[in-house]
Structure formats: C-alpha cells, structure tokens
Amino acid sequence: MSEDAAERQSRWRRMVHRLERDYRCLPPAEKARIAELSAPLVRLQQSLDRLFSKADGARICAACRGACCAKGHNHACLPNLLAYLQQQQAPPQPDFSQTCPWLGPQGCVHEAGRRPYNCISFLCDKLEERLAAADVAEFYRLDRALRTCYQAFVARYPGGGMTGLLLQSARLDGRSLLFFHSATTDDRAQEPV
C-alpha cells in the first residue's frame, strides 16, 4: 500500500471511529431524525439501482472494469455511513490502494441503499443508451429527489456535505461530523460529547 493510501486508510479509520462514538452519544430524538431523513434516501437509491439493473449495469460495469469507480476515493458521505450505524453494523472497510476503495471482487461493497451519492447517481453513456427514454427521464427525476434528500443532511450537519467524508472531516478540523442545529434548544448548535 502506498504511503498516500496508508494515510487515507488511517484517516478513514479515525474518522469512522469518531463518527461511531458521536452517533452513540446522540439523543434518541436526533437518532430518530436521522432515520427519518435516511428512509427516503435509501428507497430512492434502491429505485435508481433497479434502473441500473434494467440497463444490465452489473455486466456493463464489469466489462469496463469500473472506469468511473476510479474516481471514488472521497465519495462516501455522512448518510451512507449513518445507514450502517443505524442498523448497528460496521461499514465496509475501504481499500485505498485500489482504483476505488469500495470496489470489491463482486463490484461495489455497499448495497444500493448505502452507496455514495456519486456512485448511485452516475449513468454513463453505455448504460443510458440501453434504457428507454421514459426510464432515462425517471432516472434523472429520481436523482433530483435524491439530491434533495442529501441536501437535508447538508442543512442539518456540517459533515453532511456531498464532497465525501474524508474531505468533510478535514474541513471540520476536529469538529464532529454530527454537530447539528436544533430548533428545540434555543437555536444553539449541539455537538455530541
């Protein structure tokens, strides 16, 4: 593993460890809010994946060996990891020495509902041309709705940005990814202890 990949791996582990700790410390009402924000996001991603499958996406991507996946180093976002934590599951371990840290021998290591936004919403030309015009229109309609779901996380959590958790974590410089604004506490920001 290159030094850069090893450093990313180390930063990832530290960031996930802190996120797990911070999530455990959230009040039940905030965990319920996360579940409320996550449910439509997961459903929309599963719908996008059905269209991907309809275009024979798994076979097409395997044939090109996931060329777009080479851009995935920083795509995993806060909602993606929170989907695992809500179910008391550990997220998959990335391998930053690979072209995409989330690409395993059988494809993406994340199930469709937990995939990074950029990965689930990307429709290359090869896939798009295999779908009927109505399916393409539906794909982009679902994508717009999904973007709105991600934006709800962006609005609530500084770590909720769509640029990926490693980048968000560095931008927050030690602050919690789950630092949130709560109207129920005199409009003061809340940070897990």
Image: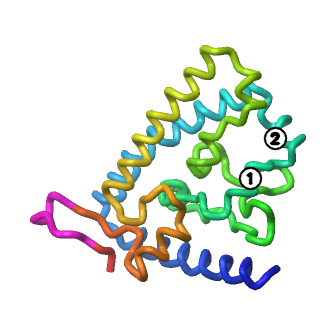
List the single residue furthest toward the left.
186
Counting from the top left corner in percent of width and height, residue 154 is at 37, 55
Circle 1 residues within 10 Å: few <14, some 14–19, many ≥20:
many
**Amino acid on which the number 2 mark rests in the picture:** Cys
Residue segment shown in magenta: 182-190
The foreground one among 106 and 70 is 70
Cβ atoms at labels 1 and 2 below 8 Å apart = yes
Quarter of the image that includes the C terminus: bottom left
Name the N-terminal-most of marks 1 and 2: 2
Q: Residue at x 58, y 59 (%)?
A: 76
Q: Residue at x 40, y 50 (%)?
A: 35
Residue on which disc 1 sits:
69
Residue 161 placement: quadrant: bottom left
Residue 5: say if magenta.
no
Residue on which disc 2 sits:
61
Q: How many marks?
A: 2
